[in-house]
Amino acid sequence: MKSNLSTKNIYLASDFHLGIPDEKTSLLREKEIISWLNEIENDAEEIYLVGDIFDFWFEYKRVVPRGFVRLQGKIASITDKGIPVHVFTGNHDMWIFDYLPKELGVKLHRNPIEKTFFGKKYLIGHGDGLGPGDKSYKFLKIIFQNSICKWLFARLHPNFGLWLAQKSSKSSRSINANEDALFKSKDHELLYHFCKVHAKSNNCDYYIFGHRHLPLKINIKDGVEYLNLGEWLSYNTFVKITPENTTLMQYKNGSMKVYENPLG
């Protein structure tokens, strides 16, 4: 199949979690992300930021969380050049509304999307709530996405509302940190099971998700792979799609290289 794209490449990354564990560390990570964006923008056809860009985000009608202005400015400069930037909501920043699309020019996605690049079909999404189990989170997600819940939260003063949400986010992360860092086997991976079921009735070549915080490369069946984007708190991993390959990469010390040890 002939692609409608040029020879430029597609880049995907997720789980920057800007805002944790403290302002100083988050700022250093933000600057590294911007350095990576500087590296890729000249040969990028499109850029996909696949959820949990911020560790917490809520837009009041006239107030947004302070900070992260360097990244926002960089994204705006990229879209001003005509390079599409896609932002997915994740479980930590599901309350992104219209601020980023209006001010930065990004395309916002709340659910996985199908795309075709260079003749290959991809399913791309953050990945939270997919697959079997995790019923408690799926229930909470329904509540948090409810319009009444969002309206009630918006009634809180931003000083209190943002403090409360950030405290809750950090508490949740400390509880789940050890579990998130472990890879037992592919059969323990909820997204692997989602991909297996989905692949039975769909013709995707690649499944690309975030959320898991581990750089994963798992074969689903012949010619079909699941890649997890990892995170930028320690791995700094991303996916690069070229006409020839779909590759899990790493950005460290100002340089990009193939990530040599994906789990799975």
Image (tube, grey):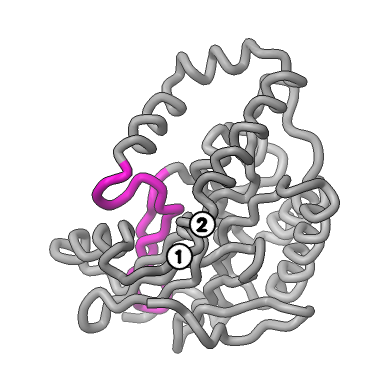
* In the image, farthest residue toward the right: 24
Determine whether label 1 and label 2 are within 8 Å by CB. yes
In the rendering, at what x and y percent does residue 72 appear?
Answer: 75, 48
Label 1, secondary structure: give it: loop
Q: Is residue 229 above or below residue 30?
A: below
Type of the residue with mark 2: Asn
Q: Is residue 115 above or below residue 177?
A: below
Quickly name the residue at label 1.
182
Residue 252 horizontal side relative to residue 5, left or right: right
In the rendering, at what x and y percent does residue 106 appear?
Answer: 62, 48
In the image, which residues are magenta? 111-134
Tell me the quarter of the image containing the C terminus: bottom left
Quickly name the residue at label 2.
178
In the rendering, at what x and y percent does residue 31 appear?
Answer: 81, 61
Type of the residue with mark 1: Leu
In the rendered structure, find residue 191 and report the number of the disc placed on it.
none
Is residue 114 a member of the stretch shown in magenta? yes
CA–CA distance in space, label 1 to label 2: 7 Å
Label 2, secondary structure: give it: helix
